[in-house]
Image (cartoon, rainbow, N blue to C red):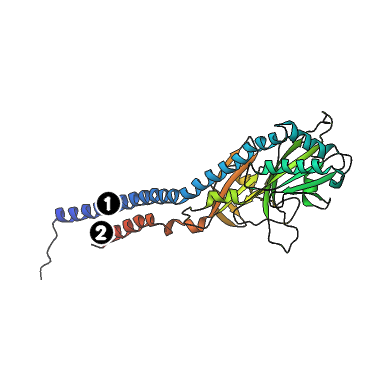
Amino acid sequence: MKKTKIPFANYFYNKLMLLNTGIICVVTLLFGVIASKNAINYERVMMLRSYDDALNQLHANYITKQDNFSNLMLTFYENGDNFQAISTLLDSDSADLSSIDAFELQRITVLFNALCNKDPDILSVFVYKTKTETLYSYSPASRVVKKLSSDSPIYDQLKNRNFSRSIHPAMNISSSESDTPILTYGIGGNLSSASASIQRKPGNIMVAYSFSGLQRALQNKNFRFPGRFYILTLDGKVIFDSEKQIVSSTQGTQFPYVEQLINKQNVITIDGTEYFSSSIIDEKYKYISTYIVPKADVAPFGLPGSRILMHACRSCLHQVQN
């Protein structure tokens, strides 16, 4: 039987068609990879947008507390009665409240109540009296001024403080470990009185706020993945933690990875796990707001956009097979 020779022209065109098909496959795959990468990044950004929105709101809520603190302090000096009341407390030679005239003690109580009425998130007000090294507290729930012992975790935080503004980390101010935790964060400063001098500060104050005011920023958000929000001092002390993991320590809870956040790293590693992160730094008040979301929960091939790449690969294989 005579072999049929394939004309050279047909052989050449077959090879050329195969080469063109290969080029088309490579180009299709390349565009598929680029399109898939862009789609994945876009989808990731859209999915994390709700976290960014919540972070901005959380950051703004805390700034509001800081900005309003000066207005709270004006309560002590906005009229003669208020100034006389705080002077009576700070300038008294005795640490015992019983030594203060009942009328003056009532005026002190009214003063603290007026301060707390300016912000519903205030849980307690703590005042350290330098003259007798005594700590007092006032709660809008009880409406009573109390003398606290030096064992109070607040005592060391306020003793010998000499800052016009101070940030106090998150703490539990419940009376005992068996009680339901009462989580607060504080903003503090100095107090003046009628006997104040440049050399001596008559007292220090810390206003303790509930977490609920900051948590409102995180309510009714469409969070697609489990994330965690923090407000931290620039040296890593936790002011707010959305998961409320606060240790019972006068030194506060430490977040050891704050340097990664300050350096604005979009992906940080915590205990071997990678997290997507975004941060806002406030240079005026020296704190940072941030969130972290496990990277594994936002894995590229878990996103719908990755199907573009898979579709491109299948198309290329189909063309080669045919």
- Does the image show residue 237? no
Secondary structure of the residue carrying numbered label 1: helix
Q: Residue furthest bottom?
A: 1
Depth check, front residue: 258 or 89? 89
Q: What residue is pinned by disc 2? A: 319
Question: Within 10 angstroms of label 1, few (less than 14), some, or many (20 or more) residues?
Answer: some
Quarter residue 305 falls in = bottom left
- Check contact, mark 2 vs mark 1: CB within 8 A: yes
Q: Residue 28, position in %: x, y?
A: 30, 51
Q: What residue is pinned by disc 1? A: 24
Answer with left or right where residue 119 lies relative to residue 80: left
Answer with left or right where residue 10 lies relative to residue 20: left
State how many labels appear. Answer: 2
Q: Residue 212, position in %: x, y?
A: 60, 51
Quarter residue 104 falls in = top right
Q: Residue 123, position in %: x, y?
A: 68, 49
Query: Residue at image x 24%, y 51%?
Result: 20
Quadrant (top left, top right, bottom left, bottom right) of the C terminus: bottom left
